[in-house]
Amino acid sequence: MWFSVAILVKAVVEGASQCPIWDESIYMVDATSEQDAYRIALEIGKDSEHEYIGGTGKRVAWTFDSIEKIYPIESHELKSGVRIFNRGLKEADVLSMRIPFPDHS
């Protein structure tokens, strides 16, 4: 069975006084159950952790935070146009999504 899993990671820039930069990624996983999908998502999240030196010469560390949601994909056939994720949003959520991110590089 297919699931979509939403994983949250955050980046902290060395010496930055700003809040972390958050990233929500949606992955498709083939799992036998929701618990199996959770286990796979945990591996993906931990594997996504990495560090690098950014354009300003400061260290940027991305760390796994959490598995936000696991959604079963209702379709038995994966093809173009199959919905893999949806969620209801409040007006404030939409307004927040439309605000551009500042350049942290």
Image: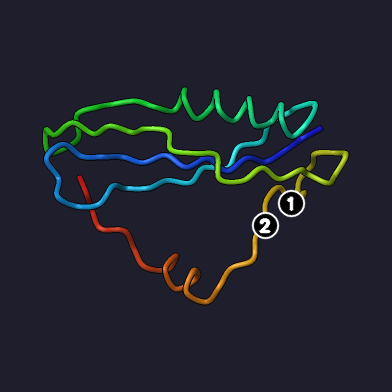
Q: Is residue 69 left or right of residue 16?
A: right
Residue 83 marker: 1
Q: Which mark is residue 71?
A: none
- Tag in front: 2 or 1: 2
What's under tag 1, amino acid-wise? Arg
Q: Residue at x 80, y 26 (%)?
A: 32
Front residue of 8/104: it is 8
- Asked if labels 1 and 2 touch by Cβ distance under 8 angstroms, the answer is yes
Q: CA distance from mark 2 to mark 1?
A: 8 Å
Residue type at mark 2: give it. Asn
| Residue shown at the point (63%, 25%) measured from the top left | 40
Name the image quarter holding residue 87: bottom right
Name the element at disc 1: loop
Asked whether, in this view, residue 101 is left or right of residue 92, the answer is left
**Residue at left offset 42%, top offset 39%:** 9
Classify residue 6 as left or right of residue 105.
Answer: right
